[in-house]
């Protein structure tokens, strides 16, 4: 199936992904591929006080991203453990 959105990882998100354990990284990558079809999947929540920022729970990790609906792009800016992500 052709992706509806393009998922782009910002440099900080790439570093975060690189530091994850292999099993956790595989789960996050699977979630990122699902964002290509639906940037607002079940379980995704809009961050309060932010314009277009969302978070997706992947086990004990959180993927923080912005949606640009006009350009059909999802910008992932952080992938962190849940106790570190909002600092």
Image (cartoon, rainbow, N blue to C red):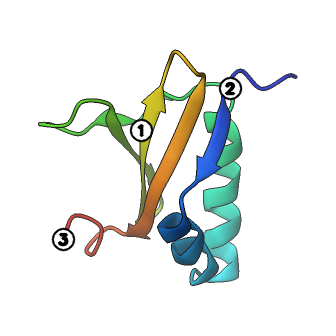
Q: Which mark is residue 37?
A: 2
Q: Residues within 10 Å of mark 1 (few under 14, many from 20)?
A: many
Which of the two discs, 3 and 2, labels the residue nearer the N terminus? 2
Give the total number of marks visible in the rendering: 3
Residue 2: image quadrant is top right
At horizontal 71% and vertical 65% (from top left) the residue drawn is: 26
Q: Is residue 79 above or below residue 30?
A: below
Residue 84: image quadrant is bottom left
Quadrant location of the C terminus? Answer: bottom left
Q: Is residue 60 visible?
A: no
Of 75 and 46, the residue lying toward us? 75
* Inter-mark Cα distance, 3 to 2: 29 Å
For this orientation, the residue located farthest to the top is 70
At horizontal 68% and vertical 57% (from top left) the residue drawn is: 29
Position of residue 23 measured from the top left corner of the image (x, y, whole percent) = 68, 75
* Inter-mark Cα distance, 3 to 1: 18 Å
Q: Residues within 10 Å of mark 2 (few under 14, many from 20)?
A: some
Disc 1 on helix, strand or loop?
strand
Position of residue 47 measured from the top left corner of the image (x, y, whole percent) = 23, 39
At horizontal 64% and vertical 41% (from top left) the residue drawn is: 7
Position of residue 28 measured from the top left corner of the image (x, y, whole percent) = 61, 59
Which of the two discs, 3 and 1, labels the residue nearer the N terminus? 1
Q: Which mark is residue 87?
A: 3
Residue 63: image quadrant is bottom left
Q: Which mark is residue 66?
A: 1
């Amino acid at each position: 199936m052709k992706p509806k959105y393009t998922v782009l990882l910002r440099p900080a998100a790439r570093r975060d992904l690189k530091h994850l354990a292999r099993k956790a990284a595989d789960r996050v990558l699977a979630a990122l591929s699902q964002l290509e079809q639906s940037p607002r999947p079940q379980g995704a929540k809009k961050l309060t006080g932010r314009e277009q920022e969302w978070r997706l729970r992947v086990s004990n990790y959180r993927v923080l991203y912005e949606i640009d609906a006009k350009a059909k792009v999802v910008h992932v800016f952080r992938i962190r453990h849940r106790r570190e992500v909002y600092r």
